[in-house]
Structure formats: structure tokens, C-alpha cells
Amino acid sequence: MLNGFWKLTWVEAKVFMREPMGFVIPLAMPVILFVLLGRSLSFGELESGSAVEVPFNLPILFALIIALQAVVSLVVIISIYREGGILKRLRATPLSPVTILSAHVFVKLAFTVVSLGLLVLAGRQFFPGAMDVQLPSFTAALLLSTLSILSLGFVIASLVPTSRFARPIVAAFLYPMVALSGLFFPIEQLPSPLQIVAWALPTTHAVALMQGIWDGSGWGAQWGSVVGLILVFGVCVGISTKVFRWE
């Protein structure tokens, strides 16, 4: 089973890297936008001996975008595979469903690590001193966040009718979550019903966890966010086992 997993992972990685829209652009765009927006906001520069105030945590915003792009990519490729009958043929192989879907998840998590690495390199190149964070811990937080949101992606992938509509549909599901994540303003400022919705979303817990790691409070202080991400993962995996369509 493990041998089949690695073979399928390698095949999926090659397919992923051959498609510019699915590989090059998602890798390049967050870095380019991060640098452009960072420069426009004077992110990382010093003014009167202190860092210029940015209205939100720019690295966390783009780390979250990297996670969301991995989910968009997953939903698109799953819908293409289903529409083309590839999922059906894979399901007929000796590989288990868990192995098949885990290969897709592993490729997206690897993509997330590479994307974060490029983002950190760009930040340290263009904004010296502004990217001081415990990188292994922050990477782990991003991976947990991405895994949790990916589980939601499998639920969405079951609802997408065709590959043509996959990208706009998943974007319409995911990107409004950023506005409710607490990144731009405290969740406490939202009306009570929206606060309940916000705390049910993985993006809210992802932002809280990554912000806590960024601030140096550590994983222990963010146990609630960790539990929230794990709960979302468990619930979405449970739903996916019931609604996921192979054809």
C-alpha cells in the first residue's frame, strides 16, 4: 500500500507541475502580491525607530491565501478527474480510497511548504527584520490549517457539478471566510450570529493559531484553535465519506 501511495503521489506531482495554471501561477502570485502590497504599505520599514503599522498581519494573510489556493487546486483537479472518468478508474485499482485521496492531499501539503518557503525568502529579501518567526512551528501551524481546510475541500468537491465551474464555486465558498477569520478586525465586533459562523470556520482557527505562533505565544496558548482545526477536519472527513462522488 505504501509503495502504491508513493507511486501515485509522484504521478500526481508530475501532473500538477505540468500545468502552469495549477503550479507556476499559484506559486508566483502570492509572492508577487506580497511584495507589491508590502511595499505599498511600507511593511517592514522603520519609521522613527519603530516598525510602520500595518492594518493587518501581511504574512499571515498570504499564508492563508496559500492554504486556500491548495484547496482550490484540489477541488479543480478532483472535478477534472471525476468528469474525465479518471477517479472511477483509480477506484477500480487495488489502491484503497484512502491511499488515492491521501496522495492528492500530500501533493497539496508539499506545495504549501514550497509556497511558504518562497514567501519567507521574499520577505527576508525585501523586508529585512519583518519575517522573524519560528519557521518550523509556523510551518506546522500552516500545514495543520491547510489540512483542515483541505478536508472541507473534499466536501465542496462533491458538490461541484463540472470542472468548468469548480474554480469559481470553490472560491465563492472559501474566500468570504477570510473576511470572517479575525484577520482584519476582531471577531467580537461581528453580530452574534456571524460570530457563531466565524468560529465554525477553519480559517478563523487557522488565523488565530498562526497569529499566536507569530506573536511567540506558542502552541499551548492556542490549544483552542488546534482543537477547532482538528474538529473541522474530523467533521468534514466524516461528511466526505458519505457524500464524496467517484463518478
Image (cartoon, rainbow, N blue to C red):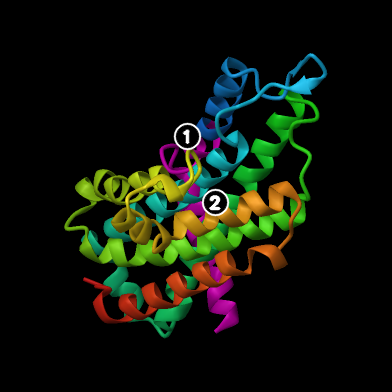
In this rendering, the answer to whether 30 lies above or below 88 is: above
Q: Is residue 23 left or right of residue 220?
A: left
Q: Residue shown at 32%/50% (left/top)?
A: 191
Residue type, numbered disc 2: Val
Q: Residue at 53%, 34% (x, y): give it.
A: 30
Give the residue at mark 1.
25
Is 167 displayed left or right of 70 in the figure? left
Residue 130, disc: none
Is residue 137 a member of the stretch shown in magenta? no
Residue at 68% of width from left, 43% of height from top?
A: 117
Decide: few, some or many residues near mark 2? Use Cα within 10 Å; few <14, some 14-19, many ≥20.
Answer: many
Q: How many marks?
A: 2
User: For the residue marked with disc 1, what is the amino acid?
Assistant: Ile
Whether 22 is drawn above or below 224: the answer is above
User: Is residue 74 shown left or right of residue 224?
Assistant: left
Query: Does the magenta portion include 9?
Result: yes
Q: Is residue 120 visible?
A: yes
Q: Residue furthest left?
A: 161
Relative to 143, say whether 42 is above or below: above
Quarter of the rendering containing residue 175: top left
Q: Position of residue 230 (x, y in %)?
A: 52, 73
Q: What residue is pinned by disc 2?
A: 207
Q: Which residues are magenta?
A: 1-28
Which one is in front, 8 or 192?
192
Residue drawn at 60 percent across, 23 percent down: 38
